[in-house]
Image: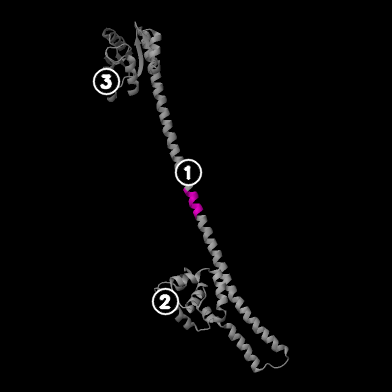
Amino acid sequence: MASISLYIVEDELIIAHDLKNKLTDFGYNIAGIDATGEKAIENIAELTKNNKEPDIVIMDIKLAGKMNGIEAAKVLIEQCQCGIIFLTSLDKSEVFNKSFFLKPYAYIFKPVDIDQMRTAIEVAYYQRNLEMTNTKIIAELKKEIDHRKTVEGERNQRLQERIKAEQQVNQLMKQKHQMELDLINRELATSSIFISQKNKIIGLIRKDINRMVRNDRSITRDEMTRVLKTIDENVKFDNDWYRIKAHFEKIYPGFFDRLRKKHPVLTPNDHKLAALLRMNLSTKEISHILKITAPSTEISRIRLRKKLGLDKTVNLTQFICEI
């Protein structure tokens, strides 16, 4: 175990060297002797810089030079970790009043009792090591607490980010679900339009046939011609276009306004074809509704694509659905 390192600050050289000799005989290491506080501060700072800081400074309160021992001790306590033992011949109460705020480890009064000095040094050394150990433990605990706070903060941040991400996913799922419901509702509404139209036609035809059957006679050519005329009149798309358009605009509000604004060159027939495409109807269904052949429907699609300025790689129906 290394010996305790001491530094003596005493302006009476006889007392200083006597202390050095006696303390050296007891196994203590005397790191230096100075007569002024200024010189002691300078030399101890150099020792500290070279990792040779003394453990205990025996400081006389009354020193040569401008700085007294209390002032010198205050500077040393601020700059290094050495313990202070005050050495003085002044009145005890006076010394205590002036220096107690520095919390020195001991007071030794002249003439010096060497055994009392040894006891003071051992107690001061023990107390100094205990305080340094406590300071180190507190610093390590503080470091550990700060580390745990950082880890906990990062964990909370990740948790918040995860919760936020899950909320965004849930929101997107809700939006997707709502879009799917809207699509289903629109498809049902579209189907209901054409079912309504078909039911109307069937009802008119049924009415004419029932009237002919009730007459209890053979159906004449003229009566059959009237039934066929009813069918022809009711399957014409133009006759019911305004009614279908009214239903369509309830399902797809603003569609025709957006279509006219983006593509003003389109004709009313182009609008009709675009509306049927927006309903996701097939070429066969569109041909049946417009009472034209499937090739004619394809030609109409090609003309509409050209007016819209679409490349061949762009899906016409998908483009219409995005308007």
Q: Nearer the viewer, residue 255 or 115?
A: 255
Q: Earlier in the sequence, mark 2 or mark 1?
A: 1
* Quarter location, residue 195: bottom right
Q: Is residue 286 above or below residue 26?
A: below
Q: Amino acid at mark 2?
A: Lys
Does the magenta-highlighted stretch encompass residue 12? Answer: no
Name the residue that disc number 3 marks.
Answer: 42
Q: Earlier in the sequence, mark 3 or mark 2?
A: 3
Q: Position of residue 213 (x, y in %)?
A: 71, 88
Q: Is residue 17 above or below residue 252?
A: above
Segment colored magenta: 161-168
Q: Position of residue 253 (x, y in %)?
A: 53, 68
Q: Check disc 3: other Cα within 10 Å, few if <14, some if 14-19, many if 20+.
A: few
Q: Mark 1 falls on what kind of element?
A: helix
Name the residue that disc number 1 marks.
Answer: 156
Does the magenta-highlighted stretch encompass residue 165? Answer: yes
Q: Nearer the viewer, residue 85 or 254?
A: 254
* Label 2 vs label 1, nearer the camera: 2
Q: Position of residue 258 (x, y in %)?
A: 47, 69
Label placed on residue 307: 2
* Label 3 vs label 2, nearer the camera: 2
Q: Check disc 1: other Cα within 10 Å, few if <14, some if 14-19, many if 20+.
A: few
All told, the count of numbered labels is: 3
Q: Nearer the viewer, residue 93 or 135?
A: 93
Marks 2 and 1, how far apart in space? 57 Å
Q: Mark 2 falls on what kind of element?
A: helix
Q: Mark 2 and mark 1 in contact? Answer it, CB < 8 Å.
A: no
Image point (56%, 69%), residue name: 250
* Label 1 vs label 3, nearer the camera: 3
